[in-house]
Amino acid sequence: MKKGSIVPWLLGVTLPLYILDQVTKFWTIGRFSEPLPNPEVPGTYYFGTSDEPIQVIEGFFRLTRVHNQGVAFGMGNGTDWAPLVFPVVSTIAFVLIALGLKKKFFVGKLGLLAVSLLVCGIVGNLTDRLIQGRLLERMEGASAWEKFKAGYVVDFIDVTIPIINYPWPVFNVADSCICVAAVILFISGWKEENKKSEATVD
């Protein structure tokens, strides 16, 4: 296997984190009940469960169940277009990652780590979109199209930022991977620019 190959990173980082992502999500849907119908808007459902959250760290970290049908941070939740847009966005992301690898945009170990985390995040949430809607009790007997439109991402990590007491949007392991990858890419790009600057000075 040639040096700089992405394969070891996919096997050593992406795969274990993907398994963790899916295990925690299936634990969540097994532990918490489905969101209830929203009486104010017939035919729609609340995004969160009616069950009490599990307090892990009082006032800071809780476990709950939220259905996210939006694109990012819940944007587009409950719309007809969001379930269609997400697979398209995921496909574009995969194409850009493949091009980035080909053009050696992702430099060194940091770059490959970022890619492996990005792939985990995208595949983890895309898996939800394609599978979770089919598993909802209320979708039993529904058409394949309706089940697809009911697809959602399972979010369960509920954090309140201390001091400012700000409730961060509920997220999951896949979301965390994407956020960490973004930070790593920023650091990697910054280090690369520094190297170029030093080389120019020399």
Image (cartoon, rainbow, N blue to C red):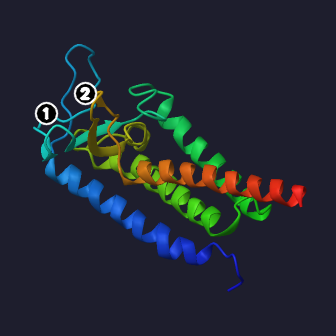
Which quadrant of the figure contains the C terminus?
A: bottom right
Residue situated in front as seen by the camera: 142 or 136: 136
Residue farthest along the top direction in this orientation: 40
Image location of residue 117, percent across then percent down: 51, 60
Residue 136 in view of the camera: yes
Query: Mark 2 belongs to which amino acid?
Result: Tyr
Q: Do the residues labelled 2 and 1 touch (CB within 8 Å)?
A: yes
Residue 91 in the figure: left or right of residue 166 = right
Image location of residue 156, percent across then percent down: 27, 45
Residue at 34%, 60% in the rendered image: 22
**Dot 2, crowdedness within 10 Å: few (<14), some or many (≥20)?**
some
Query: Mark 1 belongs to which amino acid?
Result: Ser
Tell me: residue 152, above or below residue 80: below
Find residue 80 and name its label.
none
For mark 2, what is the residue?
46
Mark 2 secondary-structure assignment: loop
For mark 1, what is the residue?
50
